[in-house]
Image (spheres, rainbow, N blue to C red):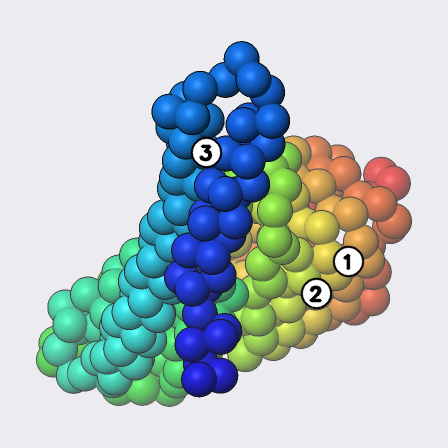
Amino acid sequence: MRRLLKSPLLWTLLSSVVVLVGVTAWLLTDRATSRGDALKTGALAGGAIAALYGLWLNDRRRRTEEDRHEIERSRISDERFAKSIELLGNEADQVRVGAMHSLAGLARTRPEYRQTVLDVLCAYLRRPFDHPKFPSKTDWDNETEAAAERERLVRRAAERLIRDILPHAGTTGPTLSLNLSDARLDKLGLLGRRVGWLGADRCEVASYLDLTDAQISGKFSLKDVTIHGTLDLTRASFERKVSLDYLVVGKPVDFSVATFAEPPSLEGAKFPSGSTLPGS
């Protein structure tokens, strides 16, 4: 009985009857209105109440269906994420690359996954890695060198996907951060991308770190970093503190082409001749 009393349909029917009777009775007070016209108008008013209930019911069903689809999408996304993480440990390099692209696709379609996917790709780049391009004590032969080269290509795919996931400089929206501390990088280019906090302490870069047109809105740290190739800062914008203590770069660096909110910290940093330092 209580459930019946709480039923929207019951109250809608009662409201329709009340409106029908009320409107009909009110119109009958006017002698110029016939009984037929009064009853017809009352029925239309009562029917309008029922129609409004139908619209409300359809909207409720639509929202319920949308919620169900969203739950299903979230479940599928979670399963896709978990499977891709599992495949990152696969021995086949093409499988690992496929898993990375799957994660990147998930980041593009589900914005709530973007920071998590970036964290996963950065964690992959922190995995132990050796290659002839890095100073190494490894005795290289054809087999080990070929294996290292395959892994290098996988890691380069991760570096490209990191760039692709990051938003473009000058845009608005959520700020994404990168934690590349202790990573071994090959060719990381963040050209024209917007990054929040970027930390890469103690990492080693084989070829280059290219920040051309990049917008770094958070703190930027390259402490105890060795870049064997190029550090390109062309038109890069650093909006917070920059720490480059004990940074070592193999090729000349031009700091004059970048914009700094405050002078960068360069304690113990080493740059080759031909470099242009801040304030030079």
**Relative side of 257 to 232, left or right:** right
Q: Which residue is mark 3?
A: 42
In three-dimensional space, the C-alpha distance between marks 1 and 3, rounded to whole angstroms, equals 76 Å
Q: Residue at x 53, y 13 (%)?
A: 32
Query: Disc 2 versus disc 1: distance between alpha carbons?
Result: 6 Å
Q: Are the residues tagged 2 and 3 within 8 Å (C-beta)?
A: no
Q: Earlier in the sequence, mark 2 or mark 1?
A: 2
Classify 10 Å Cα crowding around label 1: few (below 14), some (14-19), many (20 and above): many
- Residue 54 x/y as whole percent: 36, 48
Q: At 56% from the left edge and 17% from the top edge, which residue is drawn? A: 31
Residue 242: give its label.
Answer: 1
State the CA–CA distance, disc 2 to disc 3: 75 Å
Q: Nearer the viewer, residue 86 or 163?
A: 86
Considering depth in this image, is 202 or 112 the residue closer to the camera?
A: 112
Residue 131 place in picture, x, y as percent: 32, 74
Of 41 and 162, the residue lying toward us: 41
Image coordinates for residue 206, horizontal then vertical, percent: 44, 63
Q: Amino acid at mark 1?
A: Val
Secondary structure under tag 2 reads: strand
